[in-house]
Amino acid sequence: MKKERILLSILALLLVFILCEIFLRPKELKSSLAEQLYRRGAYEKAGRLYEKIGEDSLALANLGKAEYRQDEHAAAQNSLDKARSLSEDSSQIDYDAGNAAYQQERYQEAAQNYIRALLKNPDDEDLKANLELALRKLQAQPPPPRKDEDENEDKQRKEEELRMRLEALDNKEVQDRKPSQPQAPSRSQNWW
């Protein structure tokens, strides 16, 4: 009888502890469940739980990882940017943001994220390798046309077109005047 009471007391305390965890720390419970789902490969379900946690840098970073695993690289980039704004000191967030940018073929942004991560974690060989890949892709990529050049070319083309139209109008006007002008009396060959 005494053993049963002790066992019931332990079970009651355990139940109270579990209920306290559920009601007093729901964020940690959701985070823990989401982490377990992520490890099992249920990235969509894990992402939904991370979204429910809200504006927490770790939850947003993990949401970004889950979105990345689902090939939603733009959404992952957005989540990781939010996470970075809440926690500036995480090299892992910069690394993951670099990976998301790389997958979107935004190599300049990827390189910047890898460099930021390397400044925080200079011994990471994966970071160095990813930075090298991003820089190689960036060098192989043709430079985007400069806005000034495009605008300048458009402006020159429009000016040339306008000049040609004005020239055509001048020529037309000259031709229109020729028949309407009275012809001067012809002079004879002799000057006397």
Image (spheres, grey):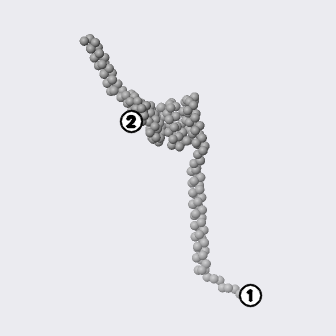
93 is higher (above) or lower (below) than 166: above
Q: Is residue 69 found left or right of 19 in the rendered image?
A: right
Q: Say which label, 2 or 1, has the lower sequence index.
A: 2
Q: Which residue, as the protein is rendered here, is positioned at the far top?
A: 2
Residue indicated by mark 1: 190
Q: Is residue 176 found left or right of 77 in the rendered image?
A: right
Crowd class of label 1 (few under 14; some 14 to 19; many from 20; radius 10 Å) = few
Quarter of the figure that contains the N terminus: top left
Q: At 29% across and 15% down in the image, what residue appears?
A: 7
Q: What is the three-letter code of the residue carrying label 1?
A: Asn
Q: Which residue, as the protein is rendered here, is positioned at the far left?
A: 1
Q: Is residue 136 found left or right of 88 in the rendered image?
A: right
Image position, residue 134 (x, y; %):
57, 39
User: Which mark is in front, 2 or 1?
Assistant: 2
Q: What is the three-letter code of the residue carrying label 2?
A: Lys
Image position, residue 41 (x, y; %):
42, 34
Q: At 32% across and 27% down in the image, what residue appears?
A: 23
Answer with the quarter of the image where residue 181 lies: bottom right
SS at badge 2: helix
SS at badge 1: loop
Residue indicated by mark 2: 45
- Using the rendered image of the protein, determine whether residue 47 is visible from the camera's viewpoint: no
Q: At 31% across and 24% down in the image, what residue appears?
A: 19
Quarter of the figure that contains the C terminus: bottom right
Crowd class of label 2 (few under 14; some 14 to 19; many from 20; radius 10 Å) = some
Answer with the quarter of the image where residue 25 lies: top left
- Using the rendered image of the protein, determine whether residue 17 is visible from the camera's viewpoint: yes
142 is higher (above) or lower (below) than 36: below
